[in-house]
Image: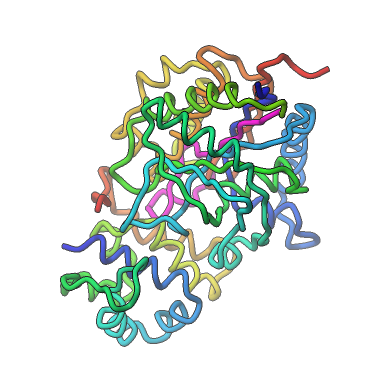
Amino acid sequence: MATVAAVIASTHHPFYYRASTSVGPDRPPFADEWVAKVEAFRDTLTRARPDVLVMVGSDHFHQLWLDNMPQFLVGKAPFFDANFYNEEREFGLPRFTLRGQEDLAAHILRNGLDKNFDLAFSNELRVDHSITCPIITLRPEADLPIVPIYTNIFAPPMPQPHRFVELGRAIRELVESWPSDLRVAIIGTGHLSLELGGPRQFGPHGPDPEFDRKAVEWIATGNLDGCLREVTLDSLHSPGNATHGFMDFMLMMGAAGDGKVADHVDSLDLFHTMEAYFTWYPEGVPA
Amino acid sequence: MSRYLLDKFLFTVDRDAALVERYRTEPVALVAWWEAQLANKILNCTDRERSSWLALTEVERAALQSHDHVKLFELGAHPFLTLTLFIAMFERDHGPLEYQRAYARAMEHLQLPYPDIST
């Protein structure tokens, strides 16, 4: 059976690419520290020696739209083109193409359905910055095949937070039951407190540093009980109007396992939002 | 009340560079054209298969035609869609993050709970 080589969760910040590649007066003062933290984070994936990446993210109204909105969707295709016109325009993100791992996608779909997750699927999916930001930060060679899994954290009505946790647990089991000798990293990105298009956006910190502090603690210690006690669809409005993206972190806590302490924890307090990076090694920390 | 149609306007304009520019320079004409031509287009169907019932309210149409992002927020337009499109139109006239911060300041009077964005 396949090996889960690493479980990795982080924020996805579309400004990282531009900040990290800019030079001279265009380079922001926080860029060097940010690059150093991301490179240390990247090393945690490299050391896991993955062959395949399962990548959890959320489409930002690029391909998925309100006339036909899935809650959870698995991409099953031989290739995934990446990034959209408005992401080039606003963030300067590059376009590229990733290979797909179709047999793992088929396994996740068939057996996920049989585990009572009514997963939607796409055979022609263009992935957006929720998938490409972690490629840029964690695997800029973009050389490994992926299975993208999209969640709806964007358009109400959304699934309950506990459903994200349960799906994370299921994805872990599905990867572990895939008849393959390959090493799979499960990577997912979301948000801590975040406001977009509202009065609290683009402040000197994230809109709710206290929520961010608690959230990092829940994730780093695998404290799903504490997290599920406090986090509801309603409560997530309070830290910032885009904070429902935290549910993708909850999914990744489910994939990492209840009570599992992360082997790598880091964060960076930026303007607008806090960045956070977590890695778990189910087989133990690589030598 | 047609939050879905407000969102559909923002979504379809934001993904098309020519429409972004037309909306920036001639918002009244573009919104009228869009409502006549695209409001009832089913995005994943052929042009022949259209909806028959979608229309903006006067308040919604006025908010779009006046580039009033605060009113759009109050009407429950999806904040991410509004922000992305308005950055595309207006960031060019400002320094780094200056437009985004002014956008937020214009909404300072708004309190939680924010308007419902469900469609």
Residue displayed at 61% across by 31% down? A186
The answer to whether residue A275 is visible is no
**Residue A97 occupies quadrant:** bottom right
Residue toward you, A209 or A141:
A141
Residue A224 x/y as whole percent: 45, 18
Q: Position of residue A273 (x, y in %)?
A: 53, 43
Quarter holding the C terminus of chain A is top right
Identity of the residue drawn at 55% across and 54% down: A128
> Left or right: where does residue B60 sit relative to residue A119?
left
Residue sitting at x 47%, y 74%: B16
Most common SS among magenta residues: loop
Residue A64 magenta-highlighted: no
> From which residue to which does the magenta span run?
A183-205
Identity of the residue furthest to the top in this view: A259
Asked if residue A195 is among those painted magenta in the image, a careful observer would answer yes
Q: What residue sits 72% from the left and 26% below the top?
A: A181
Q: Nearer the viewer, residue A87 or A216?
A: A87
Q: Which residue of the protein is positioned furthest toward the right in this rendering?
A: A287
Visible residue check, residue A62? yes
Measuring from the top left, give residue B90's x and y in whole percent. Answer: 48, 73
User: Is residue A157 or residue A118 the one in the foreground?
Assistant: A118
Q: Nearer the viewer, residue B94 or A224?
A: A224
